[in-house]
Image (cartoon, rainbow, N blue to C red):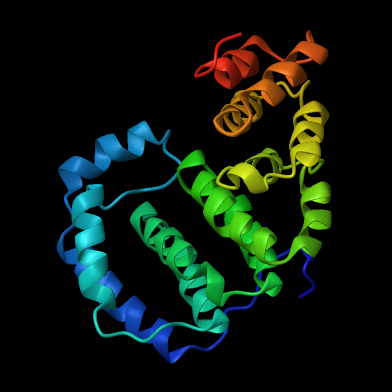
Amino acid sequence: MSVTGAGTPAVPGSVLADTVLERLTAAYAAAADPERAAPMRAYMKDVAPFLGLPTPLRRALSRTVLEGTPRPDEADCVAIALRCWELPEREYQYFAVDYLRRHVKRCTSGFLPVARYLVSTVPWWDTVDALASHVVGGLVAADPKLKADMDEWIVDDDLWVARTALLHQLTYKEHTDTERLFAYCLRQSGHPDFFIRKAIGWCLREYAWTDPEAVRGFLAREKGRFAPLSVREALKNIGA
């Protein structure tokens, strides 16, 4: 699959993934709490069923699952992520996101199509935002040629793909490509969806910690282009 390809990636063979998934499904299932699962599912707008594992317990179980396992290569990361995405309960996808965040430096630009699949499959902010800022962002930082892919993602019809492009520089601070950040915000300034408008404000607010005057100046120049929600979010920590 090419870096810009779409579709369902193939799951590679991986002995590590076999071990991790066997341990993971046993550990998580044994700790499942149906009484907690129902409100967790409702809070996430019924995007997926839940096992009912609160985050501290889930991450403690994950540490036990991974104890003694070797560092993965890219194929292992692909296999673990895709196999977790095949499971219905959301906590398995949370495990995959945490795992990819930890090991994103083991992945090359060739992982980007997998990241796109994860972003656009069973999408909601709880997985998309971490994938955007910590996985896709890490891939682009390591290979600037992938900026061209972000230029395509920002105009994608899938709002979660576009949101990922907006948020991928969220942790870049002084290394932010400011011209691209502002251009992406302008490109989606008229989008009607809450999640895009919120993302515009969020990425500007985050960059404002690094250069508040740049953000103020940008919003002043483009006054009237952005929804009130985006502007409020952008200026929340620095004022008008």
Looking at the image, which residue is at 34% across and 55% down?
91
Quarter of the image that includes the N terminus: bottom right
68 or 155, which is in the foreground? 68
144 on left or right of 11: right
Looking at the image, which residue is at 62% across and 54% down?
137
Quarter of the image that includes the C terminus: top right
In this picture, is 224 found above or below 108? above
- Look at the image and tell me whether residue 233 can be seen: yes
178 on left or right of 53: right
Residue 202 is situated, as x and y percent measured from the top left of the image, at 57, 29
Looking at the image, which residue is at 34% across and 79% down?
20
Looking at the image, which residue is at 36% across and 48% down?
49
222 or 175, which is in the foreground? 175
37 on left or right of 197: left
51 on left or right of 132: left
Residue 143 is situated, as x and y percent measured from the top left of the image, at 72, 66
Residue 74 is situated, as x and y percent measured from the top left of the image, at 56, 80
- Look at the image and tell me whether residue 169 can be seen: no
